[in-house]
Image (cartoon, rainbow, N blue to C red):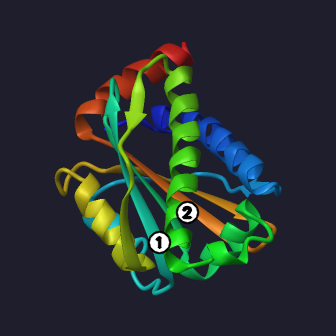
Amino acid sequence: MLRDDLLDGLREVINIGAGHGASALSVLLGKEVRLAVPRVWHGTLAEAREAFDGDRTPVFGFTFRVMGDMEAWVLVAVSESDGKPILEMLWPGEAGLSSEEMVVSGLGETAHIVSGAFLSAMANLMDMVAFQSIPRLKRGPHSEVVADFVSRAGESDSVFIGIEVEMSVESLTRWEMIFVPRAASVSLVAGKLEEMLR
């Protein structure tokens, strides 16, 4: 696992990547996007699941697999109640595009762009190659969507590093992004962080 100083370095890299993701979301929506300080978990899968237990807010969850030099998983989640307002920001005045199918499609494409901007900035900063899959959608209570993602992303109950980033748009929407590097990539990330901290 990572030392405390390397965890701080990883948090800073995530923060820079998240800043690019927030900028991409701001351009797409034409609104100011506020970025919360990233939260880092460093423990077991059980502890990660417990961190979200009890939140029953219905959400759309889009999961991306990250491949390349760094293998990881990314979850982008947004509450279902914010789906149509976000679509209206993307395509103002197009009431006919507010069907559920269009909401899911629009949110999925937006999540793909935001996650891609996040990963690209982070990979460039650490001089690595990273690209993402098409999104996999899971809907349901927030705690269940995150628990499903954590179980998919985690490889054992003894190794887990996760970083959560929240983005908000004019108090209307909350975009949540969770990044989990695979265990095999943690040593690579640690090496890159040590080079950057020298």
What x and y, as percent, mark residue 4? 46, 38
On screen, residue 116 versus residue 179, left or right, reads right
Q: Residue at x 25, y 39 (%)?
A: 183
Location of residue 170 by image quarter: bottom right
Helix, strand or loop at mark 1? strand
- Crowding at dot 1, Cα within 10 Å, few <14 / some 14-19 / many 20+, comes out as many
- Crowding at dot 2, Cα within 10 Å, few <14 / some 14-19 / many 20+, comes out as many
What x and y, as percent, mark residue 5? 50, 33
Helix, strand or loop at mark 2? helix
Query: Residue under circle 1?
Result: 60
C-alpha gap between disc 1 and disc 2: 8 Å
Query: Residue under circle 2?
Result: 107
The residue under label 2 is which amino acid type? Leu
Instruction: Name the foreground residue: 56 vs 78.
Output: 78
On screen, residue 153 versus residue 83, left or right, reads left
What x and y, as percent, mark residue 179? 44, 48
| Mark whose residue sits in front, 1 or 2 | 2
Residue furthest to the left in view is 156
On screen, residue 197 versus residue 61, left or right, reads right
Pointers 1 and 2 in contact (C-beta within 8 Å): yes
Q: Would you say residue 87 is visible in this rendering?
A: yes
The residue under label 1 is which amino acid type? Phe
Residue 129 against residue 36 in the figure, above or below = above
Instruction: Name the foreground residue: 36 vs 6.
Output: 36
Residue 124: which disc? none
